[in-house]
Image (cartoon, rainbow, N blue to C red):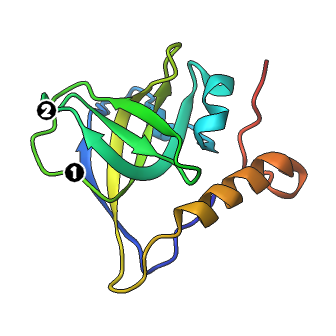
Amino acid sequence: MIAFPARYRAQVLFSTTQRGGMSTILDSPRPRINHSMLLQHIGRPVCFVGRVEKVNPNGKSFTVADGESRTVTVELNNPHNEELGGIVEVVGTVSNKGLIMATTFSILQEAKGVPFDLELYNEAVKIVRDFPQHYPFQVAASG
């Protein structure tokens, strides 16, 4: 998987995963994707990293922009009542409408004076997709 540098610390803020002997989305491999890859992953678990652009006042959804400034809506099972902003990593399933139904999300804490380079991250995601023979950990898209 693509690892974040140690200077970025993830803080899990929201999780709807229930364990108790059942397999969850967090137990299976999930590809890192950007907006252009959404429709190739309908019904599958994914990981999406982007900058929070807008939060719905009801707390049930927010919009995230990837490294190409293309946005995707993230839907939550339960309202999130705390402040949300910056770079987030969302793990969830892509719906047939192209939304991400979040299982969990984390805010990536940026080190002082070192902003997260979302454009560079986006390029890394595309390289992993374009050269799967060099990145065998990537989940192969079927269909």
Residue depicted at x 46% and y 79%: 6
Up-down relation of residue 38 to residue 68 (above or below): above
Residue depicted at x 36% and y 74%: 110
Up-down relation of residue 86 to residue 96 (above or below): below
Where residue 108 appears, as percent x and y from the top left, is: 36, 63
Q: Residue furthest bottom?
A: 113
Where residue 112 appears, as percent x and y from the top left, is: 32, 85
- Which is in the foreground here, disc 2 or disc 1? 2
Closer-to-camera residue (50/135): 50
Residue at mark 1: 84
Q: What secondary structure is marked by label 1? A: loop
Residue at mark 2: 57
Amino acid type of disc 1? Leu
How far separated are the C-alphas under marks 2 and 1? Answer: 11 Å
Along the polypeptide, which appears first: circle 2 or circle 1? 2
Q: In which image quadrant can residue 17 be found?
A: top left
Residue depicted at x 46% and y 70%: 116
Closer-to-camera residue (20/15): 15
Where residue 98 appears, as percent x and y from the top left, is: 52, 22
Of the 4 image quadrants, the one containing the N terminus is bottom right
Q: Residues within 10 Å of mark 1 (few under 14, many from 20)?
A: some
Q: Is residue 24 left or right of residue 84?
A: right
Q: What secondary structure is marked by label 2? A: loop
Amino acid type of disc 2? Pro
Residue depicted at x 53% and y 13%: 96
